[in-house]
Image (tube, helix red, strand yellow):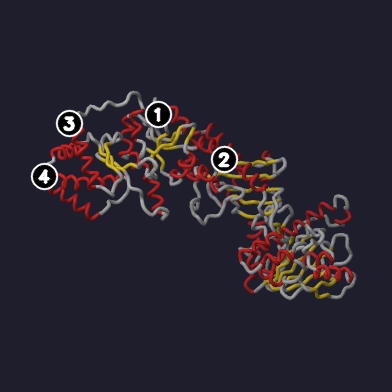
Amino acid sequence: MPDTASQSDKPGKDAEPPKKNATKKARTEAKTNASEPLAFQAEVSRLLDIVANALYSNRDIFLRELISNGADACDRLRYLALTQPELLGGDTELAVELRPDVAAKRLEIVDSGVGMTRDELVENLGTIAHSGSAKFLSQLGDKKTEVDLIGQFGVGFYSAFMVADKVEVFSRRAGEQHGWRWESDGRSGFTVEESAEAPERGTRILLHLKDDATDYAEPLRLRHIVKTYSDHISVPVKLAVTDGDDAGGEPETLNAAGALWARPKSEITEEQYQQFYHDTAHAFDQPWQTLHFKAEGMIEYSGLLFIPTTRPLDLFDPSRRGGVKLYVKRVFITDDCTEVVPTWLRFLRGVVDSEDLPLNVSRELLQNNPVLSKIRQGLTKRVLSELEKKAEKEPEAYVTFWEAFGPVLKEGLYEDSGHDETLLKLARFKSTAPDLGEPGWTTLADYLARMPEGQEAIYILAGDDLEQLARSPQLEGFRAKGIEVLLLTDPIDEFWTVRVSSYQDKPFRSVTRAGGELDKVGGEETVEEDGEEENGGLEALLALLRLSLQGKVKDVRASKRLTDSPVCLVADEGDIDLHLARLLKQHQRLDDTPTRILELNPKHPLVTALSETAKAGASGAGDSIEEVGLLLLDQARILEGEPPLDPAAFSKRLAGLVAKGLG
């Protein structure tokens, strides 16, 4: 049952002499039937304590490890029997069987695989690793973070000591006469002796469960663990109850013993796909899209992936778990592997099964290997290709997907530069274009097709609420010119538009800093009809406001973007965008918000009246303009979602102005 995949390996240079001596001694006395106490390799007791208490985060994993080892032993016997059919004898069934005993607080895991000789028991169960153990011990040190080094060595069997205070292993090699018993408490060493209790072929592991682990002898708990971790093991995993009402009945097969994703698509019904989706994703909706594939070549892997119809509740939860389960040769490894599925495809549910992926010994932490990145690249391209087909053939159905998962997919534009072209093609945007209808989504390609003469950029406005954005004063001049603006309401929009910067050579430009370009769009430049006299009043007003608002704004200037509102705030060229600055400050990533430019609408009645007052230069006009200027600044801040500079002073000024207006 323990993993003996490398039992034919020779000890490496780092192997320690005590291990060699113990093995040699075992071989010398292999034909005796005396119980022989043997010491673990140096410091193995300490290592076992680390393995049992630190290596695995979930104690259920021990059963996965032992079942997996048993399945490996069955697979090795199946291969050997191709040329040596006599090894199977009269028993051709290859399976793993669980035999719980609640009353005795015991659990047996029995396989009918290839089994082990005495030498192999000593070699495989008496040492942590066959080679490099001295190097491993020297590197381990006392740092907790270095426990990950265990992942490079063969200790999966020792996870049994997480739940058992004593482990007995009975084994008989296929085709051999003698059976053997190995016993250890995981601390003081182990004993090996000949035993008539060994199975006719294969391995039987007997766990004497700890007081806090007796629930692992409960049939219900075992069914759940097998269903979760070993449902698609290639050999049957059976449950034989030895006590209670169900004792003595036929063993119950717990696993499917066949991977749905490994079967041809022509053999699988839509109902089977849906049931697998519900079982795998623990979801109640129907899958929006099903992707069943097999990749062949230098790297082989298969997958059965689903895109949900509805957004999972934890999609944006930082503590979320991944939705794609990684298998290697039908052995469940993890459901939280971002090395295989990028985080911006985290809405995917299903299974990926690799034939080539190397694992570390705990099967929890995957080794760094280029196979992972190649599988990731292949999966990503396949999913994006399927989305492109859906968007082209069923645009209305694709909008349903985008509304649920578009914000996540756009994260790929910020995190992964290798898919910009495809992701921008898949992206959908709300827009100010009046003829889009419902639901009002547009593509970048369609936006470019509607651009008027002279427009050299893709204009965007980012914020938190779509309705507020649609009413923003920043859009007035663009609407007047017939220029379409994309309205972005997802937090990631502020970041990907900076990294990607352009689409088909057209840069993304925020309207909060692009008003000066309006004259260049839509034909000839606008001819100002205001006379010098009126301009003189406006210049006087601007000068007074620059002086009174010094330090509160970067500049005060006449606006070309406003048609109805009196004022707005804009960002200077090179400054951070207004909404992005607010986001960063909310998350304590920005200490001080850059000062902004205050723009006045020269044609608004309020600004016109103030210009006349400034031009007249009457006594006290400066103080009056300063008060109104502060009110206008606070008004502009409120329109941008910012609080007034001084709420109490703002309230006082507003009350005074209303009282003055009422006489």
Out of 621 and 263, give the one closest to the viewer: 621
Q: In front of the other: label 4 or label 2? A: 4
Circles 1 and 3 in contact, beta carbons < 8 Å: no
Q: In front of the other: label 4 or label 1? A: 4
Q: Quadrant of the N terminus?
A: bottom right
Q: Earlier in the sequence, mark 4 or mark 3?
A: 3
Quarter residue 448 falls in = top left
Give the CA distance from mark 3 to mark 2.
57 Å
Mark 3 Cα shell of 10 Å, populated few (<14), some (14-19), many (≥20)? few
Residue 418, numbered label = 2
Q: In the displayed structure, would residue 134 be above or below residue 501?
A: below
Q: Earlier in the sequence, mark 1 or mark 3?
A: 1
Residue hosting label 4: 619
Asked if residue 387 lies left or right of residue 239, the reply is left
Q: Position of residue 511 (x, y in %)?
A: 36, 37
Q: Earlier in the sequence, mark 4 or mark 2?
A: 2
Residue hosting label 3: 533
Q: Earlier in the sequence, mark 4 or mark 1?
A: 1
Mark 4 Cα shell of 10 Å, populated few (<14), some (14-19), many (≥20)? few
Q: In front of the other: label 3 or label 2? A: 3
Q: Which element is circle 4 on? A: loop
Give the CA distance from mark 4 to mark 2.
65 Å
Give the CA distance from mark 4 to mark 1.
47 Å
Residue hosting label 1: 455
Q: Which element is circle 2 on? A: helix
Quarter residue 111 falls in = bottom right
Considering every residue shown, the one lying at the far top of the view is: 524
Out of 657 and 31, give the one closest to the viewer: 657
Out of 583 and 210, give the one closest to the viewer: 583
Q: In the displayed structure, would residue 57 be above or below residue 377?
A: below
